[in-house]
Image: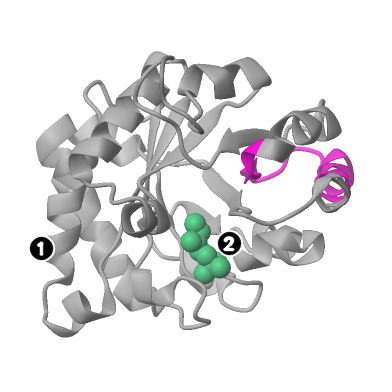
Amino acid sequence: MARRILIAGNWKMNGLQSDGLALASALATHMRGTSDPAFEMLVCPPFTLISKVVDAVAGSGIQVGGQDCHAAEKGAHTGDTSAWMLKDLGCTYAIVGHSERRTDHGENDATVKAKAEAALAAGLRAIVCIGETLEERDAGKTLDVNRTQLHGSLPAGATAENTVIAYEPVWAIGTGRTATPEQAQEVHAMIRSELVGKLGQGVADAMRVLYGGSMNPKNAKELLAQQDIDGGLIGGASLKADDFWAVAQSCP
Ligand code: 13P
């Protein structure tokens, strides 16, 4: 089954207004000059830049997402942003459960599942992140850890249209140390087989599973060529328009 490759940039906590605008405008120029791209492109700026970026990429086909959302629709949650607010700004996606959120904010699988369900309820697509630490990999627990996180974080009502999984080994994030294509494919294949059991063959075949962790223009082609890798969630290399565009050009 052909799955449309998703090239997603997670800008994390980077960029003042002028930087974000320049980056978004450069990507929009690339995208407007491309007819019938072989990929779907998404950028997830910090909350402060979402409105400006939505305007800058309007009509280019580039989508905009949030990096997190609260599980509630509204209420007394100082400093938080709801999925409905992201939707209201023009977002179509929300990343949930990124390992930096799990570490910095103590999020666990139950929190992530609730956030993903809020994203779906608000009409967004959820990108649900999972991944093992180096300690867990060295202890031979990679598949078990990812299986547990997948089952605990997957939102009720997940379909291939509304949910994307992102496998991001924690040891590969921001370290320049990428998983080999074989290491990534092994986990992606496990994820797909778990999805078959949970959601059925048809949904599992159609659901996209992204790889994230030091993906860049040099290694993207080999990673994206793997059978069960359906795109990338890109941090550092998404902050330079030419690098991010080069990653997108590596789609098979
Ligand atoms: P890097 O590409 O900087 O390793 O970050 C990956 C990531 O965490 C994307 O969500």
Q: Residue at x 58, y 49 (%)?
A: 8
What amino acid type should be assigned to the residue bearing mark 1? Asp
Q: Is residue 45 magenta?
A: yes
Locate residue 245, reporting x and y percent: 74, 58
Q: In the drawing, what numbered circle is on residue 79?
A: none
Residue wearing tag 1: 144
Mark 1, other Cα within 10 Å: few <14 / some 14–19 / many ≥20: some
SS class, disc 2: loop
- Confirm if mark 2 falls within 8 A of ligand 1: yes
The picture quadrant where one finds residue 202 is top left
Between 202 and 176, which is closer to the camera in this rendering?
176
- Image position, residue 186 (x, y; %): 25, 68
Residue 164 visible from this viewpoint: yes
Q: Is residue 132 above or below residue 51?
A: below
x, y (%) of residue 243?
74, 67
Q: What range is drawn magenta here?
A: 24-47
Q: For this view, does 215 lie left or right of residue 178?
A: right
Task: Kindly identify the amino acid type of the residue bearing the numbered disc 2.
Answer: Gly
Q: Residue at x 61, y 26 (%)?
A: 91
Vertical side of 62 occupied by 136: above or below: below
Residue that badge 2 annotates = 235
Q: Nearer the viewer, mark 2 or mark 1?
A: 2
Q: Quadrant of residue 156?
A: top left
